Image (cartoon, rainbow, N blue to C red):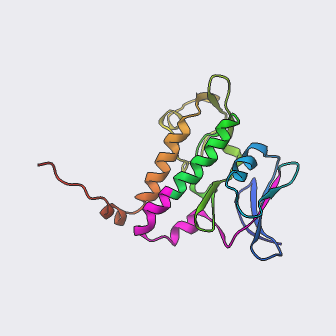
Amino acid sequence: MSELFSLCRYVKIISEKHKNQYKIIFKNENKYLINSILSHKLEGMTTNPIFTNISFYADNVSSFPNFLNNVSPTDLYSVVIKVLYSINNQLINLIKNNYCFTCLLLQDIIVIDNHTFIYINPKYLSKINCDNMIKINYPFPKQAFLSPEISSLTYIPFFTSYKSIYYSLGSMLIHILFQSQDNLSLIHISEPT
């Protein structure tokens, strides 16, 4: 068993002795986050009874920033579609269970077999209350993708709609698509006539 990488202080990704077997190990129990990951139905995916780790088979696993370094500008559109599909499916599963992420960070996404993208930082998972609000109890890192109401907050705790995560997701997707000036050439804007 060897550690591939740690995405945050709460999560480690390790490669098992058996070829192509991986394990995500969480510091604490994360039932709802693990269930949202299980919704991706990866080959051989299992979890332990106390929801602290998840095992699966894959050809490769990488951090999202490392994955992006190897993507050509012409492939970014298809990557954005896959990220949208994967993260949205995870959000649907979480929201169905009254949980939601408060923000998104690129470095907290893992990429499995170059087509499945999973957000795995439990720190930014919040319970949705009966008013469809999530509670913000902590400041966010500067590189987090945030909705305007969260990025402009001046005090905590703060309550906002769980739907603010969709703004964060959209911001992150736009950032991925146009991360460099070279990618601006992919946009064809015609001048008004």
The residue drawn where x is 82% and y is 75% is 18
| Residue 126 locus on image (x, y percent) | 68, 37
| Residue 151 locus on image (x, y percent) | 51, 38
Is 29 situated above or below 40? above
Q: Is residue 104 magenta?
A: no
In the rendered image, which quarter is residue 32 located in?
top right
Q: Is residue 105 visible?
A: no
| Residue 80 locus on image (x, y percent) | 48, 57
Residue furthest out toward the right: 49
| Residue 133 locus on image (x, y percent) | 62, 28
Is 102 situated above or below 158? below
Q: Is residue 115 visible?
A: yes
Residue 172 versus residue 8: which sits nearer the camera? 172
Q: Is residue 73 magenta?
A: yes
The N terminus: image quadrant: bottom right
The residue drawn where x is 57% and y is 47% is 88
Residue 33 versus residue 85: which sits nearer the camera? 85
Residue 66 versus residue 93: which sits nearer the camera? 93
Is 184 situated above or below 167? below
Q: Which residues are magenta?
A: 52-81
Q: How many marks?
A: 0
Left or right of residue 179: residue 189 = left
Residue 17 versus residue 26: which sits nearer the camera? 17
Residue furthest out toward the left: 193
The residue drawn where x is 74% and y is 55% is 9
The residue drawn where x is 63% and y is 47% is 90
Residue furthest out toward the top: 131
Left or right of residue 40: residue 56 = right
